[in-house]
Image (tube, rainbow, N blue to C red):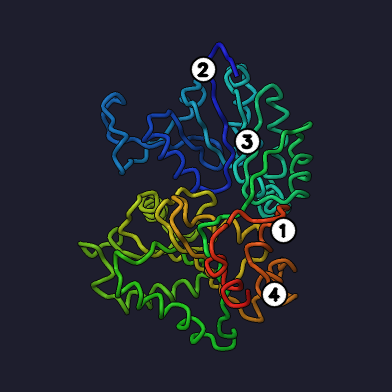
Amino acid sequence: MQRDKPMCVLVVSPLNSLMIDQVMSLRKGGVKACYLNITGTHGITYEESIDDEEDIDFTSSECLESDVPFEQLANGEFILIYSHPEAFIKTKFSRLLRSKLYQDIVGAIVVDEVHMVSEWGDNFRPAFKNLGEVVCVFEDAMHLLLTATATVSATETLSKVMNLKAPVVVAENVDRPNIFLEIRNRLPNIKKFEKYDDLIHPIALELKEKMHAFPVTIMYIENLEAMGYFFQFLMYELQDNAYDGEQIPQNRIFGQFHKDYPESMKQIIIQELTKTNPKLRLILATVALGMGLNAPSVERIIHCRPPTNLEKYLQEIGRAGRNGQPSTAVMFFNKNDIAKNRKGMTEEIRMYCTEQKCLRLMLVNYFGFENFIFSGERENCCSNCKVYM
């Protein structure tokens, strides 16, 4: 796209963790980028030091948060602006988008993780369903919608919701051939603390034994009660070994990540995960740990309970093996986890847990592909292939 004036790209993103990760990476590359607070009244960016920008060393792994006054946004000083969808709808920033300056400089609108329009737009965050208005405001700009987890029917629905006319759809096979897929049974819910111990005890022993050789692992936990129990279990088991150096939270080799966790600690975890060899080896997380997070060192994903659909599952296991390294995705389930009365539970994820077919093939078939990319030995494909094929 050719423009006489500098071009600005607006990126709609659903989670703070995702925006923080991407803005940090862009700033380290010297790109003028920021993200907005959810009300659209000011922005946040990252600097290496308080010196003038010419003196900033963006190759450092550490970044300092810096406020962006609204005046800088109004002057069009940023090339990339990340935002929650709420900031685009009926806010100070949404009015700025209709100004002559922004009508002139905005060259592209990008909606990252666009599947959230359908997933969150009805009740949880209705602003997602109104993002089609932004498309109408910038009719002459390019529009790019990104997702790794949309079925054929979902793609058609999203095109209508976003007011796109004859969009070009680029679809790539969702198979991640370097990730071994595994399903395991877990104890029934009636055994409350035993079921917790059964999940966390072997992980704690492995972490204590391997320490920095422990494969970087994200352990998805559905509720904060279980997360708190797991965290205290790890603290008790590892004691002084829980830290790499001085015994401060920043040096713990395991951590927790959820929406109510202090923002400063969440940023430390995100920064650690962007490293190729982080001191942080195990993260206890809810879904608040961002979609699309660039975490090159993650080698294992553990689901303590199945997500309610295959879209969420694929999204979350996709955080492993980003550098192509052999990785593992383990999902635990019991009968209660896949019961028909569980809210939002789909038949496809229930079948994925219980049937003796190839897990990889079931997954790619659901997303509209006839076969997978994986070409190795069947025993390295998935737990079902290892046992039944």
The reply to whether discs 4 and 3 touch (Cβ–Cβ < 8 Å) is no
**Image: 293 above or below 201:** above
Position of residue 1 measured from the top left corner of the image (x, y, whole percent): 60, 19
Residue at numbered disc 1: 366
Which one is closest to the eye, mark 4 or mark 3? 4
Instruction: Give residue 355's mark.
Output: 4
Q: Is residue 154 left or right of residue 262?
A: right
Q: Earlier in the sequence, mark 4 or mark 1?
A: 4
Query: Disc 3 to disc 1, how far (Cα)?
Result: 33 Å
Q: Amino acid at mark 2?
A: Pro
Residue at numbered disc 2: 6
**Which of these two is toward me, 24 or 153?**
153
Query: Callout 3 environment at 10 Å: few (<14), some (14 to 19), or many (20+)?
Result: many
Element type where label 2 sits in the image: loop
Q: Earlier in the sequence, mark 2 or mark 4?
A: 2
Q: Residue at x 28, y 25 (%)?
A: 52
**Image: 205 above or below 366:** below
Query: Disc 4 to disc 1, how far (Cα)?
Result: 14 Å
**Image: 10 above or below 255:** above
Q: Amino acid at mark 1?
A: Tyr
The reply to whether discs 4 and 1 touch (Cβ–Cβ < 8 Å) is no
Q: Amino acid at mark 3?
A: Phe
- Which quarter of the picture shows residue 26? top left
Instruction: Give residue 88's mark.
Output: 3
Q: Is residue 224 left or right of residue 108?
A: left
